[in-house]
Amino acid sequence: MTENEQQVAGLILAAGGGRRLGGRPKALLEHRGRPLVEHAAGVLRAAGCAPIHVVLGARAAEVHERAELGDCVLVDNPDWEQGMGTSLRAGLSSLTGTGARAALVSLVDQPGIGAEAVRRVLGAHDGESALVSAAYDGVRGHPVLFGAAHWEGIAEAATGDRGARGYLREHAAAVRLVECGDVARPYDIDTEADLIHLE
């Protein structure tokens, strides 16, 4: 493969409003003294994703102002309240014309998943037809990698909060699972109780 054929864009879904966190957008939660979205972008950058697109929604203007996202492309999703599916569609659409052959999708609220897990998933992809997912004790999780040949189908199937779940279930036989349970912890920051995971 040439370098261009291997190019994988990073796509961070960071639009949620944190309904179960009292309306605090997850992108703006503090982790190690900085907004959580900065940490997520740093993980993808360290793993070698380029370009990195970040889908924003809730309080997007405040995220623009407070988070130092440097070389990231910020994608505003005005329909974020309708669920994660809208963010996935907006993100994949924003990658059209970038030359990326695949997109690695991560969630802003999973700081326990670092660059090593991302690198493992990246290392398992083999071009535009790839479907790769991190696994934890054999159970599919994030990040997930979608070869460009799947973007249109995933966008069509992404509705509500389901994102790509239905598409991946329909194409389960083609999904390559990469075990990451030894290097990452796939918890989500969903509720007040989960805030103990932030430093």
Image (tube, rainbow, N blue to C red):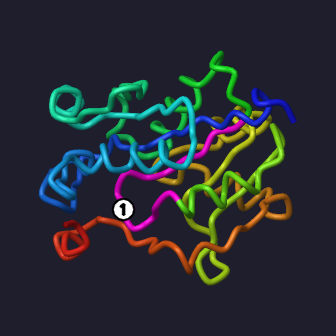
Q: Which of the pair 61/66 is nearer the observer? A: 66
Q: Residue at x 22, y 35 (%)?
A: 67
Q: Quadrant of the N terminus?
A: top right
Q: Which of the pair 48/141 is nearer the observer? A: 48
Residue 2 magenta-drawn? no
The image quarter containing residue 172 is bottom right
Secondary structure under tag 1 reads: loop
Q: Residue at x 56, y 78 (%)?
A: 181
Report the side of 149 relative to 32 (left or right). Answer: right
Residue 119 horizontal/vertical position (percent): 61, 56
Report the side of 90 relative to 14 (left or right). Answer: right
The amino acid beneath tag 1 is Pro
The number of numbered discs placed on residues in the rendered structure image is 1
Residue identified by numbered label 1: 111
The image quarter containing residue 116 is bottom right
Q: Magenta segment range?
A: 102-115
Residue 129 horizontal/vertical position (percent): 84, 42
The image quarter containing residue 188 is bottom left
